[in-house]
Amino acid sequence: MRFIFKTSYAQDIQLAKHGGHVFWYSVLGLVLLGAPWLFAEYWLAQLTFVLIYAVVGLGLMLLAGFTGQFSLGHAAFLGVGAYTQAVMTNAGLPFPLALLCAAGLSAAVGIVVGLPALRLKGIYLGMATLSFGFIVEEVLARWEKVTGGNAGIHVKAPDLFGWKVDSGEGFYFLCLGIAVASTLAILNLLRSSTGRAFVAIRDSEISAQSMGIHLARYKTLSFALSAALAGVGGALYAHKLQFISPDQFNIIQSIDLLLMVVIGGLGSVHGAFLGAIFLITMPQAIALIKDYLPAVIGQAPGLQAVVYGVVLVSFVLFEPLGLYGRWLKVRTWIQMFPFYRKGMFKRQKSFQKSDRLK
Amino acid sequence: MQFLQLVISGIAQGCIYGLIALGFVLIYKATETVSFAQGELMMLGAFGALAGMTMVGLPYWLAVPAAIAGMAVFGVLLERVVIRPILGQPAFSIVMLTIGIGYVARGMITMIPGIGTETHTLPVPYKDQIWNVGPLVLNVEQMVVIAATGVLCAGLFAMFRYSKLGIAMQASSQNQLAAYYMGIPVKQLNGLVWGLAAAVAAVAGLLLAPITFVHANMGFIGLKAFPAAVVGGFGSLPGAIVGGLVIGIVESLSGFYLPDGFKDTAAYVVVLVMLMVKPNGLFGEKLRKKV
């Protein structure tokens, strides 16, 4: 067991709560820095994807996990970011400027989508974002002059003021830097009053409002920040794939993103990363076990969908806090060994709170 | 005439949307959760009838009720096994859960060797027949859709209005706790509502199958039924049908009069406009949470 004795108020908002945090995150940092020399090229590429998805996941986590607003059209923001980046880069803009444009435009779009969110709740908001996602996908497909339509568009390598990042390692470090920066930004945001306001809105809009939180402002802000991160992620995604087309940003992608934060664990920053790891490694894992299954199952085209569905259903049923929740349990078990009790994380029985007036 | 023709085919398509939306609304009214698996239930219903007709060799008039009854049982089981354990959890968990169920259903159908990845046609007796009424050319398949939707709606209306079961369902959808105190078995009713929603979805699938194809991805049409439910107001049964008709007609007309690409997005544009103008839909009740 570890006991933290608080001796100053500053300790409450420290990012690393104790020595263990410092040690383990340093190890993680070193491994990530050394990854190009530790892993083969293929795995490095997968790691880059994990980082990219984690950036997007952080955005969605902020919106869904911390503000409690669900977006079923998050792929649209990803798409806006990716296409902005593609067009800007191909026009010769340097990478940081293009990235800024991608984030800015996505954020602007996010604000537009966030506007109905002020009046809409729950499923209606989901519907609005879903509809918006479809419309953006269609615009990307039809606005052929700029986006190249369904044929897609090629994206040049990022150009960092003269330094062409065209190697896998270089791009990996770029993604790593951006992922670390956005993680720190989110962590910092969450310990500020803005972040607390988000969490308050998630837990109860009415009590948040009565504590003087301007719902409209914070909801829009949350949408904008979330969309901006999705835009940054989309920009990196465009560079990584070097080719983008509208069907990469469809409803399936949106649902995958949601699946990522739900499986990772809603309401935790770790969850975004764990979810991203899950989303990237799952197809690989399925490909690996395919050979050991009977051909009827292993070679069937629907296998991946079934596995995704079953995993999602079982997480919602048995582990609503996702992978991070599972890790918390394991960690507590280790810390308290042998005193862990079975009911420690038991879900409280709750009655459904009706939204109805009657 | 062109216009009338378009409206009629829009109504037929709208009936399908309306029927799927009816499933959403039934479940939403009863349990205040949203099922994203409705389109997949529709797909399963269509495949069920297909299997009954082509593999078992049942005649059409036997395969259809069998498929509907089968889906109703499936709906009840689904509620019992996966939905009930997490009732009372945030609504979003159930949304994710039903998305998961949809994935599994679609994947399972795709995995059936030889059948899952193909497109099939449901051999209905009224396939490819046409009526000529004056200058109008009426497609019998579409007429059947409209007629069947009408009959089904009348049946549902009668059930909710006159039968004990329907009134109990209404009561439990208005206030679960009060209904429970009145001796209404709310949990069993929720199961039945899921069964009913699945059966309605199966009907929609059977009606849609002759117009398009039976395919593992046909459930994606459920995504267009959401706008229908929202336009009608999520808590209103007649609203679902009206919303479906609105979406169907707008889609059909915009496909003809507006440039390419508007047909697929018309439904979503309509729903966005609706949400801005009248967030509770045409027939929705105004909701405000009490503190």
Image: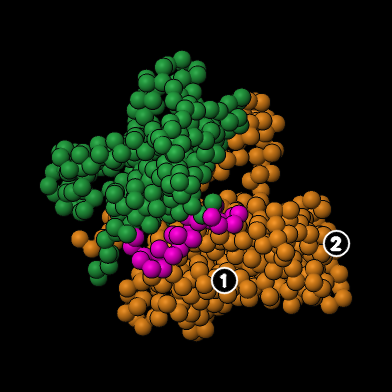
Q: Chain of mark 1?
A: A
Between B147 and A191, the one nearer to me in the picture: B147
Residue that badge 2 annotates? A167
Q: Chain of mark 2?
A: A
Tag 1: Cα neighbours inside 10 Å, few (<14), some, or many (≥20)? some
Q: At x 38% / y 49%, what residue is drawn?
A: B245
Residue A114 highlighted magenta (yes or no): no
Q: Position of residue A197 (x, y in %)?
A: 44, 77
Q: CA distance from mark 1 to mark 2?
A: 32 Å
Q: Label 1, on which residue?
A: A109
> Can residue A81 be seen by looking at this rendering?
yes
Residue placed most toward the observer, B121 or A251 = B121
Colour assignment, chain B: green
Callout 1 amino acid? Val
| SS category of the residue bearing label 2 | loop
Query: Nearest the camera: A251 or A131?
Result: A131
Image quadrant where residue B258 sits: bottom right
SS at mark 1 in the image: helix
In the rendering, what colour is chain A? orange
